[in-house]
Image (cartoon, rainbow, N blue to C red):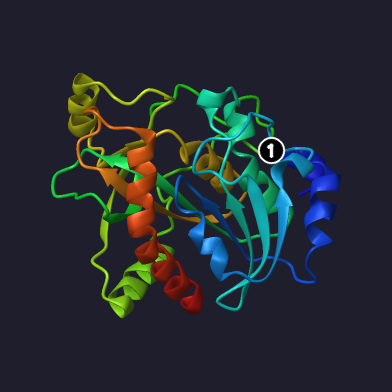
Amino acid sequence: MSMVSLGVPASDVSRVSRETDESPSVAFVLGSGLSGLADEVEGASFIPYDELEGFPAVGAVAGHAGQLVVGRIAGVPAVLFKGRAHQYQGATAHDAAYPARLAAALGVQTLIVTNAAGGVGDGLHTGDVLLLSDHINLMGTNPLSGWPGPSGGTPFIPMRDAYDPALRSVAHAAADEIGLSLKEGVYAGLLGPNYETPAEVRMLRTLGADVVGMSTVPEVIAARALGLRVLGFSLVTNVAAGEDLSHEEVLEAGKNAEVQLRALSLAILRRL
Protein backbone atom coordinates (compact mmCIF):
# COMPACT_ATOMS: atom_id res chain seq x y z
CA MET A 1 0.00 0.00 0.00
CA SER A 2 1.28 3.45 -0.81
CA MET A 3 2.03 6.24 1.63
CA VAL A 4 -0.38 8.43 -0.32
CA SER A 5 -3.21 5.96 0.26
CA LEU A 6 -2.39 5.97 3.98
CA GLY A 7 -2.40 9.74 4.21
CA VAL A 8 1.19 9.66 5.47
CA PRO A 9 3.67 12.18 4.04
CA ALA A 10 6.72 10.55 2.47
CA SER A 11 8.84 13.00 4.47
CA ASP A 12 7.69 11.40 7.75
CA VAL A 13 8.63 7.90 6.61
CA SER A 14 12.04 9.07 5.41
CA ARG A 15 12.58 11.08 8.64
CA VAL A 16 12.01 7.96 10.77
CA SER A 17 13.94 5.70 8.39
CA ARG A 18 17.03 7.93 8.67
CA GLU A 19 17.25 6.99 12.36
CA THR A 20 17.52 3.23 11.85
CA ASP A 21 18.92 0.63 9.49
CA GLU A 22 16.14 -1.81 10.38
CA SER A 23 12.46 -1.95 9.57
CA PRO A 24 10.45 -1.78 12.81
CA SER A 25 8.17 -4.74 13.40
CA VAL A 26 6.38 -3.41 16.50
CA ALA A 27 4.97 -0.01 17.39
CA PHE A 28 3.83 1.19 20.81
CA VAL A 29 1.50 4.07 21.59
CA LEU A 30 2.19 5.14 25.18
CA GLY A 31 -0.61 6.86 27.07
CA SER A 32 -0.72 9.30 29.99
CA GLY A 33 2.09 8.68 32.46
CA LEU A 34 3.25 5.54 30.63
CA SER A 35 6.21 6.84 28.65
CA GLY A 36 8.79 5.11 30.87
CA LEU A 37 8.92 2.11 28.53
CA ALA A 38 10.91 4.30 26.16
CA ASP A 39 13.78 4.16 28.69
CA GLU A 40 14.25 0.51 27.69
CA VAL A 41 14.98 1.33 24.03
CA GLU A 42 18.49 0.39 22.93
CA GLY A 43 20.24 2.81 20.57
CA ALA A 44 17.34 5.21 20.89
CA SER A 45 16.79 8.15 18.55
CA PHE A 46 14.18 10.77 19.39
CA ILE A 47 12.04 12.69 16.92
CA PRO A 48 9.77 15.47 18.27
CA TYR A 49 6.28 15.28 16.84
CA ASP A 50 6.60 18.81 15.50
CA GLU A 51 9.27 17.49 13.13
CA LEU A 52 6.72 15.11 11.57
CA GLU A 53 4.68 16.79 8.83
CA GLY A 54 1.68 14.53 9.22
CA PHE A 55 1.40 14.46 13.00
CA PRO A 56 -1.54 16.65 14.05
CA ALA A 57 -0.44 19.92 15.64
CA VAL A 58 -2.79 20.03 18.62
CA GLY A 59 -0.44 21.00 21.45
CA ALA A 60 0.79 18.98 24.41
CA VAL A 61 -1.14 17.23 27.18
CA ALA A 62 0.51 16.76 30.58
CA GLY A 63 1.98 13.26 30.77
CA HIS A 64 2.44 13.04 26.98
CA ALA A 65 6.03 13.69 25.93
CA GLY A 66 5.27 14.32 22.25
CA GLN A 67 8.15 12.30 20.81
CA LEU A 68 8.64 9.33 18.55
CA VAL A 69 11.40 6.97 19.70
CA VAL A 70 13.20 4.64 17.30
CA GLY A 71 15.45 1.74 18.28
CA ARG A 72 15.40 -1.79 19.64
CA ILE A 73 13.49 -2.92 22.68
CA ALA A 74 14.11 -6.41 24.04
CA GLY A 75 16.02 -6.99 20.80
CA VAL A 76 13.01 -6.16 18.61
CA PRO A 77 13.17 -3.23 16.13
CA ALA A 78 10.45 -0.85 17.26
CA VAL A 79 8.99 2.63 17.19
CA LEU A 80 7.36 4.13 20.26
CA PHE A 81 4.95 7.05 20.25
CA LYS A 82 5.38 8.91 23.55
CA GLY A 83 1.98 10.54 23.67
CA ARG A 84 -0.86 10.88 21.19
CA ALA A 85 -3.21 13.46 19.72
CA HIS A 86 -6.73 13.41 21.16
CA GLN A 87 -9.98 14.40 19.57
CA TYR A 88 -10.80 16.57 22.60
CA GLN A 89 -7.78 18.69 21.56
CA GLY A 90 -9.40 19.35 18.21
CA ALA A 91 -7.92 16.45 16.23
CA THR A 92 -10.21 14.55 13.90
CA ALA A 93 -10.60 10.79 14.33
CA HIS A 94 -8.44 10.42 11.20
CA ASP A 95 -5.76 12.61 12.81
CA ALA A 96 -5.94 10.75 16.11
CA ALA A 97 -5.18 7.52 14.25
CA TYR A 98 -1.95 8.90 12.78
CA PRO A 99 0.33 6.63 14.87
CA ALA A 100 -1.36 3.56 13.37
CA ARG A 101 -1.14 4.97 9.84
CA LEU A 102 2.53 5.92 10.20
CA ALA A 103 3.31 2.53 11.75
CA ALA A 104 1.72 0.79 8.75
CA ALA A 105 3.69 2.97 6.34
CA LEU A 106 6.90 1.95 8.17
CA GLY A 107 6.08 -1.73 7.70
CA VAL A 108 5.09 -2.48 11.29
CA GLN A 109 3.08 -5.68 11.77
CA THR A 110 2.02 -5.32 15.43
CA LEU A 111 0.63 -2.27 17.23
CA ILE A 112 0.55 -2.24 21.04
CA VAL A 113 -1.62 0.54 22.47
CA THR A 114 -1.66 1.65 26.10
CA ASN A 115 -3.75 4.15 27.98
CA ALA A 116 -4.65 5.39 31.42
CA ALA A 117 -8.32 4.69 32.07
CA GLY A 118 -10.96 4.91 34.74
CA GLY A 119 -12.20 1.63 36.14
CA VAL A 120 -15.96 1.12 36.02
CA GLY A 121 -16.15 -2.69 36.15
CA ASP A 122 -16.36 -4.76 39.31
CA GLY A 123 -13.18 -6.08 40.86
CA LEU A 124 -10.79 -3.49 39.42
CA HIS A 125 -8.35 -1.61 41.61
CA THR A 126 -6.15 1.43 41.11
CA GLY A 127 -2.90 0.26 39.56
CA ASP A 128 -4.36 -2.80 37.83
CA VAL A 129 -3.18 -3.55 34.30
CA LEU A 130 -6.13 -4.63 32.15
CA LEU A 131 -5.64 -6.54 28.90
CA LEU A 132 -8.18 -5.26 26.40
CA SER A 133 -10.40 -7.87 24.80
CA ASP A 134 -12.76 -5.48 23.01
CA HIS A 135 -13.92 -1.88 22.90
CA ILE A 136 -17.10 0.19 22.62
CA ASN A 137 -16.83 3.27 20.40
CA LEU A 138 -18.87 6.02 22.07
CA MET A 139 -16.84 8.88 20.59
CA GLY A 140 -19.37 9.64 17.89
CA THR A 141 -16.61 9.58 15.27
CA ASN A 142 -14.67 7.05 13.21
CA PRO A 143 -11.24 7.30 11.53
CA LEU A 144 -12.59 5.45 8.48
CA SER A 145 -15.16 8.14 7.66
CA GLY A 146 -14.37 9.11 4.08
CA TRP A 147 -12.08 6.03 3.95
CA PRO A 148 -8.60 7.57 3.91
CA GLY A 149 -7.10 4.10 3.54
CA PRO A 150 -5.48 1.87 0.91
CA SER A 151 -6.62 2.38 -2.67
CA GLY A 152 -9.33 -0.09 -3.55
CA GLY A 153 -9.97 -0.87 0.10
CA THR A 154 -13.26 -1.00 1.90
CA PRO A 155 -14.31 0.82 5.08
CA PHE A 156 -16.39 -2.18 6.18
CA ILE A 157 -13.73 -3.64 8.46
CA PRO A 158 -14.61 -6.65 10.65
CA MET A 159 -13.87 -5.85 14.29
CA ARG A 160 -14.74 -9.18 15.92
CA ASP A 161 -11.11 -9.86 16.86
CA ALA A 162 -9.86 -6.28 16.92
CA TYR A 163 -7.60 -7.19 19.86
CA ASP A 164 -5.72 -10.18 18.49
CA PRO A 165 -6.61 -13.42 20.37
CA ALA A 166 -3.21 -15.01 19.73
CA LEU A 167 -1.39 -11.93 21.02
CA ARG A 168 -3.64 -11.89 24.08
CA SER A 169 -2.57 -15.49 24.77
CA VAL A 170 1.06 -14.35 24.52
CA ALA A 171 0.29 -11.54 26.98
CA HIS A 172 -1.19 -13.98 29.50
CA ALA A 173 1.83 -16.27 29.22
CA ALA A 174 4.16 -13.29 29.69
CA ALA A 175 2.16 -12.15 32.72
CA ASP A 176 2.43 -15.61 34.28
CA GLU A 177 6.19 -15.49 33.66
CA ILE A 178 6.61 -12.28 35.69
CA GLY A 179 3.99 -13.15 38.31
CA LEU A 180 1.46 -10.50 37.25
CA SER A 181 -2.26 -11.10 37.66
CA LEU A 182 -3.72 -10.00 34.34
CA LYS A 183 -7.45 -9.51 33.83
CA GLU A 184 -9.20 -8.96 30.50
CA GLY A 185 -11.87 -6.37 29.89
CA VAL A 186 -13.68 -3.98 27.57
CA TYR A 187 -12.59 -0.39 26.94
CA ALA A 188 -15.19 2.32 26.32
CA GLY A 189 -13.92 5.29 24.32
CA LEU A 190 -15.59 8.65 25.02
CA LEU A 191 -14.75 11.98 23.43
CA GLY A 192 -13.85 13.87 26.64
CA PRO A 193 -12.17 15.94 27.93
CA ASN A 194 -14.47 16.04 30.95
CA TYR A 195 -14.63 13.01 33.19
CA GLU A 196 -17.85 11.01 33.33
CA THR A 197 -20.96 11.84 35.31
CA PRO A 198 -22.27 9.23 37.79
CA ALA A 199 -25.14 8.51 35.38
CA GLU A 200 -22.67 7.94 32.56
CA VAL A 201 -20.70 5.54 34.73
CA ARG A 202 -23.87 3.54 35.42
CA MET A 203 -24.61 3.51 31.70
CA LEU A 204 -21.11 2.23 30.90
CA ARG A 205 -21.45 -0.59 33.41
CA THR A 206 -24.79 -1.54 31.89
CA LEU A 207 -23.24 -1.58 28.42
CA GLY A 208 -20.53 -3.97 29.58
CA ALA A 209 -17.54 -1.64 29.81
CA ASP A 210 -14.80 -2.32 32.35
CA VAL A 211 -12.72 0.83 31.80
CA VAL A 212 -13.33 4.18 30.16
CA GLY A 213 -10.98 6.62 28.46
CA MET A 214 -10.63 9.24 25.73
CA SER A 215 -8.26 7.64 23.21
CA THR A 216 -7.14 4.33 21.66
CA VAL A 217 -10.30 3.50 19.69
CA PRO A 218 -9.38 5.50 16.53
CA GLU A 219 -5.89 3.97 16.48
CA VAL A 220 -7.23 0.44 16.81
CA ILE A 221 -9.88 0.84 14.10
CA ALA A 222 -7.34 2.28 11.66
CA ALA A 223 -4.77 -0.38 12.55
CA ARG A 224 -7.23 -3.17 11.79
CA ALA A 225 -8.21 -1.50 8.53
CA LEU A 226 -4.53 -1.49 7.58
CA GLY A 227 -3.93 -5.12 8.53
CA LEU A 228 -1.96 -4.57 11.74
CA ARG A 229 -2.38 -6.97 14.66
CA VAL A 230 -3.34 -5.13 17.84
CA LEU A 231 -2.67 -5.67 21.51
CA GLY A 232 -4.07 -3.21 24.05
CA PHE A 233 -3.65 -2.41 27.73
CA SER A 234 -5.37 -0.03 30.11
CA LEU A 235 -3.77 1.07 33.33
CA VAL A 236 -6.55 1.60 35.87
CA THR A 237 -5.89 4.98 37.45
CA ASN A 238 -9.05 5.23 39.54
CA VAL A 239 -11.80 2.80 40.44
CA ALA A 240 -14.86 5.01 40.14
CA ALA A 241 -14.75 7.29 37.10
CA GLY A 242 -17.14 10.18 37.60
CA GLU A 243 -16.10 10.83 41.20
CA ASP A 244 -13.74 13.65 42.05
CA LEU A 245 -10.30 13.17 40.51
CA SER A 246 -7.69 15.22 38.75
CA HIS A 247 -5.35 14.69 35.81
CA GLU A 248 -2.48 14.91 38.30
CA GLU A 249 -3.91 11.90 40.16
CA VAL A 250 -4.15 10.00 36.89
CA LEU A 251 -0.48 10.70 36.17
CA GLU A 252 0.57 9.66 39.67
CA ALA A 253 -1.31 6.37 39.42
CA GLY A 254 0.34 5.76 36.06
CA LYS A 255 3.77 6.43 37.53
CA ASN A 256 3.20 4.00 40.38
CA ALA A 257 2.06 1.12 38.18
CA GLU A 258 3.93 1.58 34.91
CA VAL A 259 6.77 -0.58 36.29
CA GLN A 260 4.42 -3.56 35.92
CA LEU A 261 3.42 -2.61 32.41
CA ARG A 262 7.06 -2.09 31.45
CA ALA A 263 8.02 -5.56 32.70
CA LEU A 264 5.01 -7.10 30.96
CA SER A 265 5.83 -5.39 27.66
CA LEU A 266 9.40 -6.66 27.74
CA ALA A 267 8.22 -10.20 28.53
CA ILE A 268 5.76 -10.04 25.61
CA LEU A 269 8.42 -8.82 23.18
CA ARG A 270 10.72 -11.68 24.15
CA ARG A 271 7.95 -14.05 23.05
CA LEU A 272 7.14 -12.47 19.71
Q: Quadrant of residue 166?
A: bottom left
Q: Quadrant of residue 239?
A: top left
What percent of the width, then of the height, locates residue 260? 35, 65
What residue is shown at x 29% (from left), y 25% (from top)? 196
Q: Is residue 128 left or right of residue 174?
A: left
Q: Which residue is mark 1?
A: 149
- SS for dot 1: loop
Q: Is residue 58 left or right of residue 117?
A: right
Number of labelled discs?
1
What percent of the width, then of the height, locates residue 25? 64, 66
What residue is shown at x 47% (from left), y 72% (from top)? 266
Amino acid type at image mark 1: Gly
Q: Is residue 239 left or right of residue 169?
A: left
Q: Nearer the viewer, residue 137 or 253?
A: 253
Q: Nearer the viewer, residue 208 or 126?
A: 126
Q: Quadrant of residue 127?
A: bottom left
**From this viewpoint, is residue 16 visible?**
yes
